[in-house]
Amino acid sequence: MNKSQLLSRFDDFHSKHDVPPSSLDSLGKIGIKVPKAIQHVFCDGSLTKALPSTGPIVYDLKKVGILDDNGSERFKDCIVFPIQDLEGSNISLIAVDVRTGNERWLDENSVWNIQHVKHCHEILAVDTIKEALALISEGKDNVIAVHGDADLGNLGANVKFIEQE
């Protein structure tokens, strides 16, 4: 199974469970608001209970980084957002820990929300998903979060990097 398929199955599995309001409340207390229109799931650790202890699926999930070397979910207790390419295929994940607000990116060089801004003339780029969510909550719909040295050359738009305080 390729990475995109694994990420889609991860998202499908967690989409079957509602995001606990307490998780969103916890993020709200540390200043992070997740707009309802933004695709997200809550990772409660139940994936490991649904998997066999060994086998190809466990190996593949460890290989892409969804499970750590011990077989635990890397994004447990996190609100998880899929990262998609311009065509809408899942290519990575970014998560926010509901207890601390810390971000966890699956891959070093990623761009979140790129599929929603591909037709924008101007794109606002920030360093964190927390900053991007804040701007989206303010009504801006042309926002991406850029992690590492992600390639933005194929956007065909004016990308404006925003320094948040």
Image: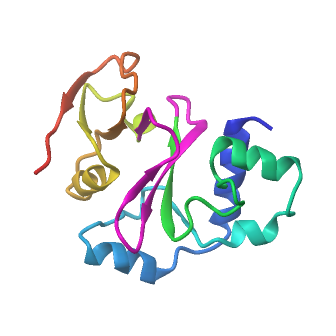
Is 132 drawn above or below residue 75 in the view shown? Answer: above
Q: Residue furthest left?
A: 165
Membership of 94 in magenta stretch: yes
Q: Quadrant of residue 127?
A: top left
Residue at 30%, 66% (x, y): give it. 33
Give how far across and how far down residue 99 sits, in percent: 39, 74
Q: How is the image coloured?
A: rainbow
* Residue in the picture at 39% in, 56% down: 103
Q: Looking at the picture, how far across and down is residue 111, in whole percent?
A: 41, 36
130 in relation to 111, above or below: below
Give the residue furthest to the bottom. 22
- The residue located at (42%, 58%) in the rendering is 37
Q: Position of residue 21 (x, y in %)?
A: 45, 81
Query: What is the number of callouts on the image?
Result: 0
Question: In the drawing, does residue 5 fall left or right of residue 25?
Answer: right
The extreme front residue here reads 70
Residue lying at 52% horizontally and 71% vertically, measured from the top left? 77
Q: Is residue 55 left or right of residue 81?
A: right
Magenta stretch in the rendered image: 85-112
User: Is residue 68 part of the magenta span, yes or no?
Assistant: no
Along the line of sight, which residue is nearer the eye, 15 or 107? Answer: 107
Residue 1's spot in the image, x, y percent? Answer: 80, 38
Nearer the observer, 133 or 95: 95
